[in-house]
Every structure is written in structure tokens, then in C-alpha cells.
Amino acid sequence: MTSSNTSKSFASVAASAKGTSESGQTNDTGFKTRQRPDAIRNSNIVAAKAVADAVRTSLGPRGMDKMIQTGNGEVTITNDGATILKQMSVIHPASKMLVELSKAQDIEAGDGTTTVVVIAGSLLDAASRLVAKGIHPTTIAEAFEKAVEKSTEILRDISIPIQLSDNKSLLQSASTALNSKVVSQHTHLLAPIAVQAVLRVINPTVDKNVDLRDIRIIKKLGGTIEDTELVEGLILDQKTIGFGAPTRIEKAKIALIQFCISPPKTDMENTVIISDHAQMDRVIKEERQYILNIIKQIKKTNCNVLLIQKSILRDAISDLAIHYLAKMKILIVKDVEREDVPFIAKTLGCKPIASLDHFQQDMLGSADLVEEITAGSDKIVKIMGVAHPGHTVSILLRGSNKLMLEEAGRSIHDALCVVRCLVKERALIAGGAAPEIELSVRLSEYAQSLSGVDQYCVRAFAEALEVIPYTLAENAGLNPIATVTELRNRHAQNDTNAGINVRKGLISNILEENVVQPLLVSMSAIRLATETVRSILKIDDIIETM
């Protein structure tokens, strides 16, 4: 700090102290920030807004895609906010808060990850202007909280309740989520798959949530996205093994084993020294007898399909065991991952077998058909017609190249999350920035009923929400100011469903265009964005530790 600044600050402190002592009270005309907290707050707001501006151009169906290159040269092409921010190298702690915000929205709703960051950036911009006018950050934070509560009330008021039996509404919301993705031209195929997958893993009358771990997505290079299919049964990423072993079994009895069919090893590093041929023959004979006993026990239960868990300590299955199993016409799949075991057991209705003693008929699962099929350059195993299926499904996702396949995987995950939102909160609202502009209009009216500084802050909150229609119009190549002004007028005349029709480049009743989204997506976006903004506003110092 320079000497002139120092003398100036001391002079101002002395003057204020003098004023206080003379009048007996402080001069409460406005909130005066100290230099360091003010600089820290501005630094945080600028850093967070920079992150919001980076993803802003990817909002909406006409948003741009980002190409992300990692340090090792891998390339990702996406317009999914959560993916962009996750792979972004962010250093500033306030910017990291926006990355975490996007993750939180991804977990809570699965969609709206770009929207939530853009809203947070706009709210921070509004808050910085309020602070500059001398309003205390805590007052702004409290007023924003009031605005969020009112927003939730308004969103519930304009929402349309639905039933899970209304397949058309579910398809419309899944299609809206997919329309802003790189794979938008395949919406007609992916949206029905997402809806059917969720409805098959839940009981619509009872369940209030969906465990997406019950929906397994297998990505296979080759073919096009048009070849993607929903499989009622199970798909295994591994291929069958064994020369002469069957690759197709009808009326299958399936065992999922977690023990090894190979010669046992000692627990410690030991060396066995064999001095003559007789001992060698005896060891080989013992090994053969050991493996033969295991295979006889397996055959005794009429098992004809064997799934073997991957082993780290030794070979899961020896060549000799493969030879014997192939002779007995048993289909073998090895190297099943440990984390896939619960899903496979649930799907097939079988129980994992941890030791040979437990290998009994009641532990097996049944299926009409198990066969090895070719998917692109790889082979996979498909199990169909499971006798006692669990509430699980598999999606076989195909793509002509790795970039498209990865993006299709992210897109279908978002579509699944949108349908999950409708299971959690069974209500829809219009898309096309209609809810945001409706909130803006109604919150401005609500601000008139408040008094003091709260009125000012809630009005700023309402204006900040106009960033969504503004950005949508900008990304679609429309005149943003004219579009937002017309949209505001339509909503002021109680046209609640007026939104931006990006395809036609005009404002229309967005519900008639079937552009809908779950209520939960918008509610959680506004709530989470405001929570983050309040947290950033209340920070007045950054303390670094070693």
C-alpha cells in the first residue's frame, strides 16, 4: 500500500471515529467494505463468472460443443456442462465451487448441469452490483433465500402433474433432454430406450426413486447408434473360452462361481524341489485329479454355463480345466469383474458360489438361451429368457467411433436421469426458457410486496434469471434483447407457456411443440445455484495453509 493511500485510510478512520464520538452513534448510511474482504469477494466472483462464461455457449439445442484435450492427447467432444467442467483444469477455489455445483446438479437431477452454472454466474453478477451499491452480503444472501422459496412455490404452481403410465409425457421429456446433445438426430431411438429401461427396473405404483445401477450400459465400437438396443436379460462384455467348447446353449443352467478351477497355491512364497520323474508324475496326477473332482461336482448339478469371477492371486481357470469343461459341453466365460457380480446375480436370479461345497442346484440360474454374438470387432455373450429375472436391464450401445460412442453414453445417462426425475417428482413444466421468464415476471411482482433492501435484492434475482432466455436466443442466432422483451410481454399477459422455439426461430406456446422438462430439474438448478452464490458471497478471506 502506498503512503498516500495509508494516510488517506487513517484519515477516513479518524474522521469516522470523530463523527461517532460527537453524535454518539455510527453513520449508518451504507455498508462500507474493508479493502481486503472487498478484493477477495471480487476475485471470487470474477473467477466463478469466468467458469460460467466458458460453458454458456453450450446451453440449449443450438449450443456449441467443446473439444477437450487431456494431457495424454485424448480428445472428448461434448456439450454436457458436467463433463466439460469435470475435465477443465480449474485452480481458483471459487471456480472449483462451480465445478462442484455442476456435479451436485448431475447427482440430484442428472440434467441442467449447464443451466445451473449459467444461473449461478448471473446471480453472482447481480450480487456484485448490489454489493457495489453498499448492500451487505449477508442481507443479499437472505433476500436470495426468500426469492428461492418463492421460486419453488411458483414452479409448483405452473407445473403439470403426470402419471408414470403416461408414456407420451415421459418420451417428450426424454426427447427434450436429448435434443441439445451431439446425438440429437438419434432422439427417436434413444428416448424410448431410456423410458422403457427405467420403467422396467421400478414398480411405478410404489417406487419414489430409481437405482441407475440396475441399468447397465455396455458400449461396443462398430456399427452406428441406430444399432443400439435394449436387452431384456444380460450382456457380458467377455467372450467364451475353450477350443471345442459350445458358444450357444439352449435351456441353460447358469452358475456364477467365485473360486478358482486351477491348482492351489501356498499362501506364502514357497519353492517345491522335485528330484525325480516319479515325483513329477505324482504332482501332475494330483493336479489332474484335483481339477477333475471340481468338474465332476459341477457336472453333477447339470450346470452347462459357467461364469467365473476374475482372480488376482492365481489363474481363475487352468488350461486343463478348460479342456475338461469343453469335453463336457459346458460354456465357459471367465474374468467376470468383481463389481459386476451383484448385478449378474440379481439379473439371473442365481447366487454367487464362493466354494465347491456350496455348488448345489438351488444356487443356479436358468435361461432359455445363452449365446456368443459378434459386436463390431469384439464378441460378447448374450443371455436371453431368464427364468426368474430381477428388475434389471442392459443397453447395448453402438457407435462408429470412440468419440460418438462416449457422447452417446453420456446422452443416454442424461435421458435416464430425466425419467428418474419424473419418478421422484411426478410433474412437468414447459421448456424453452418459459419457466425462467415466468419466474422473473412473478418475482418482480413479489418484490413490490416487500419493503426495504429485500425488494431491491429480489428484483435483482428476478432480472438475473433472464440470462437463460437471453443465452438460448443468443445461441440460436436470434436477437436476444428483442426476444427476451417479447417473451416478458407475453408472460406479463399470463401466457405462462410462451417460450423460445429454437427450431422455428420465434416465440410460441412451447407445450404445443412438446418441449417439456421435469419440475425437479428447474427446482434443483435454482436452489443449488443460489446456495453456491450465497456461500461465495459470505467469503471475505482466503486463508492458505501449508
Image (tube, helix red, strand yellow):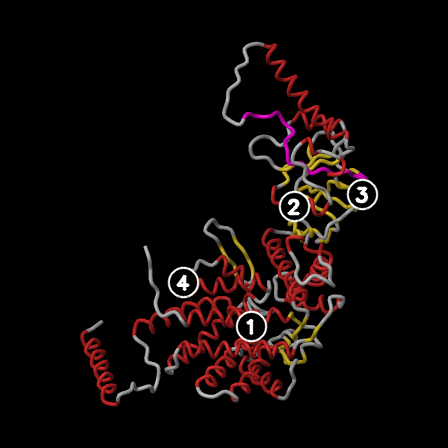
| Above or below, comparing residue 476 to residue 211 in the picture | below
Dot 1 corresponds to which residue? Answer: 475
Which residue is at a point 44% across and 58% down the rendered structure image? 89
Dot 2 surroundings within 10 Å: few (below 14), some, or many (20 or more)?
Answer: few
Dot 4 corresponds to which residue? Answer: 93
Q: Secondary structure at mark 4?
A: helix
Q: Secondary structure at mark 2?
A: helix
Q: Which mark is residue 368?
A: 3
Sequence-first tag of 4 and 3: 4
- The answer to the question of whether label 1 and label 2 lie on touching residues, with beta carbons closer than 8 A, is no
The kind of residue tagged 2 is Pro
Dot 3 surroundings within 10 Å: few (below 14), some, or many (20 or more)?
Answer: some
Q: Secondary structure at mark 3?
A: strand
What is the C-alpha distance between the residues marked 3 and 2?
21 Å
Q: Give the image location of residue 43, x and y in percent.
A: 37, 69
| Above or below, comparing residue 282 to residue 508 in the picture | above
- Which range is magenta? 250-266
Dot 2 corresponds to which residue? Answer: 342
**Would you say 138 lies left or right of 248 here?**
left
Dot 4 surroundings within 10 Å: few (below 14), some, or many (20 or more)?
Answer: some
In the image, which is nearer the foreground, mark 3 or mark 1?
3
